[in-house]
Image: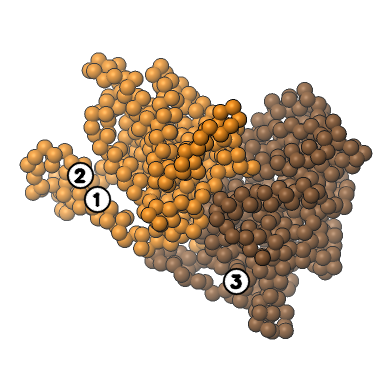
Amino acid sequence: MKYRLGTMAVAAVMGASPVLAELVFPSLSYRTGPYASGGIPLADGYADYFTMLNARDGGIGGVMTNVMECETAYNTEKGVECYESLKGEGALVFQPWSTGIAYQLIPKTAVDDIPLHTMGYGRTSAANGTVFSHTFNYPANYWNGASGAINYLMEAHDGDLNGKKITLLYHNSAYGKEPIRTLEELSEKHGFELSLMPVDHPGQEQKSQWLQIRRDRPDNVIMYGWGVMNQVAVQEAINIRFPMEDFIGVWWSGSENDVMAAGEAANGYKALAFHGVGNDYPVFADIQTYVVEAGNAAGAGDQIGTVLYNRGMYAAMLAAEAVKYAAMLAAEAVKTAQEMHGVADITPAMMRDGMEALEMTEAKMEALGLPNFGPTFTVSCENHGGTTGLVAVSQWNASAQQWDMISDFAPTDMEVIQPLIEEDSAAYAAENNIDTRCN
Amino acid sequence: MFYREAGDFSTTYPQDQQTFPIKFDRYRYYVVLLIAVVIVPFVINDYWVNSLLLPFLIYAIAALGLNILVGYCGQVSLGTGGFMAVGAYSCYKFMTGVDIWWGGELLFRLPEFNIFFSVIMGGVMTALVGVLFGLPSLRIKGFYLAVATLAAQFFLVWLFNRVSWFYNYSASGQISVPERDLFGILITGPSVQPWAAYLFCLFFTILCAYVARNLTRGSAGRKWMAIRDMDIAAEIIGVNPPRAKLTAFMVSSFFVGISGALFFAVYLGAVEVGEVFGIQKSFIVLFMIIIGGLGSIFGSFAGAAFLVLLPVVLKLVGVDMLGWPTDIVAHLNLVIVGFLIIVFLIAEPHGIAQLWRVAKEKLRLWPFPH
């Protein structure tokens, strides 16, 4: 970091490639601004997992990890600044935790040859690896979410959604607009009536939307919200006595922050999930021993085990696993038998290859101390979204103050999603003159 | 000692009326231009361009535009973000070919504009929209006008979010810039060379500053200032208030539109209107001209530089050197900017530009002040 300043002073950082003695994981966090309540646990979880790896295993394959944090405040301009300042530090993979910043970085990362992992957010059609070479969105994306919600509602309505009314309450931004196409297709397929209800940033004003919902009396409300919008929506739903059981949020609308404020009345609110909840996993004992008790917990250290903390940790775990794959591939490339050999020389390009070869199995998650924490999936050159798009549903238990998983990771309707992914990525490829790969 | 006009005689009126009548100033200005155009492009990299220079140049154009309206003509505007959005979306539509629909059928499609003319069209369309939203200024002033322009801000953002024609019906509602070049050199897109993006924006910045400087000291600028100082008196001495106010709105919006177009096409590459061109943008440009100096061309640059550089410098010092947590530094940034605005409003209402003027006065007398 010191030499960044030094080089800035002489204004000649060009081509100066840093010595890769450590594995650099940039963390574009937002601990300030209107979305900080979500950003803090995500950043804490991401940092703590790597701290734990350093303390317990001496890094990954003997090489220490270094999490470099940069504050974006969920703002695209600051996100660009962070990206530019960290990419020269040997950053292995960027995770911006913001769909807006992800859209900025998708073309930039492809040019700079650095992978971008947008886990459960970003541009959904990036799942098509033949067009988006450097963007990954495994294990689940927005459209899996939309389909997962519909599948769940289908079950709840005894397998028939015909004539039912479903309202989508969404953050009026790229993020919130993403599921609309999928839901429209699904409404045609299943015969339910879809109505759209946008909420403008930052989402504190929702009175008119909920008045409309009270008038329409939809059978279910699906929410794509983030930050303060979630809390307000849950409170407004309670105010109009909308049954919480019929209210289902995507995974960005399903953390403790969103329901705690509403207290007992939020009981029964549901949210989608692509990873486990709670701290009932062996890995948390290690985090407690090596991170918390050592006094190295990121932030205030009060987020451990919350939904979003787990998500940050999950992202870190997947990144660490991808590093192992990258090391393995590098080792194969130089024909060395030792698996971990060459881990020190990981470049962002190798990291990308590693992510493309990633395979998460139940046995592996168990070995990592996270049994049944996330869905099993494999990533391939063509499919950057994970093979299956498995999504589960969780429910808020207000008296116990915890989220409970109420379903297993179930497959989503790839029959509907895949053509949409093909269509959208083809449009992107045409717009930007991209040749498809993996042939 | 060095900085004085002794021996610097003007023998003609044009000489006397030039922007920099003092030789030293003039040479300094040439040197700055020379460094900016000839030397900087060779020594910059991605970080310098994308984190410092592009935002500085583009915000400087926006600040110039707003300064014409607020600083020179005295019409308070909080619609800058919305006007920048008009520039960005017009630029996008013109560079991808404007499609006109009638009754569900494509009537015709304009050919795709070159990036340079797309940016100019961004300015032209914004000028038209600016005149439209400037109409209330004929009847109301002060706070009430600020509220009317605030309505423009919210209406325009809502419009670009709501009408999918503006973002070419993309699923996400974002506009993403396609790759465009000028004489075979890429100007937009991810593969653009840092110097190309820099020079492209620098060209517009110099052009806008030149035009702004010469407009404000000509008859148009004098009319604006007369309106600002006292509109009734101005009317009595023969200034046409509607005309002066609307031209100020038009010119100001033109600059703001150009900056919006560059902000989208060259700097960010992908834009979501509510996030990028929200009310925050209006405020930050207003802060720039307040801190930099109302009614001053130099002030627009100084304010833009100040607000673009300050967060980056604070981050470098706080996070990279001192190792403070990132959130503390981010909060500190807000505190410091807020504090400085109060300090400037109390201690030096004319901003950095006035400090600069005072410093120059002192330098002229130095080392013998009496």
Which amino acid type is marked by label 3?
Answer: Thr
Question: Which chain is tinted brown?
Answer: A
Q: Residue at x 39, y 43 (%)?
A: B117
Category of crowding for the residue at label 3, using alpha-carbon neighbours closer than 10 angstroms: few (below 14), some (14–19), many (at least 20): many
Which amino acid type is marked by label 1?
Answer: Tyr
Which chain is home to disc 1?
Answer: B
Q: Nearer the viewer, residue A63 or A272?
A: A272
Query: Can you give x and y, in whole percent of width and height, for residue B44 in the image?
Result: 40, 61
Q: Residue at x 46, y 57 (%)?
A: B192
Q: Residue at x 26, y 42 (%)?
A: B357
Eyeballing the image, is A419 above or below A267? below
**What is the quadrant of the C terminus of chain A in the image?**
bottom right
| Left or right relative to B79: residue A362 | right
Q: Colour of chain B?
A: orange
Mark 3 to mark 1 CA distance (whole Å): 45 Å
Disc 2: which residue: B20
Mark 2 to mark 3 CA distance (whole Å): 53 Å
Contact between labelled residues 3 and 2, with CB atoms less than 8 Å apart: no
What element does badge 3 sit on?
Answer: loop
Query: Can you give x and y, in whole percent of width and height, for residue B208 in the image?
Result: 33, 41
Q: Earlier in the sequence, mark 1 or mark 2?
A: 2
Mark 1 to mark 2 CA distance (whole Å): 8 Å
Task: Determine which of the numbered discs, if any, sits on residue B29 in the image.
Answer: 1
Disc 3: which residue: A347
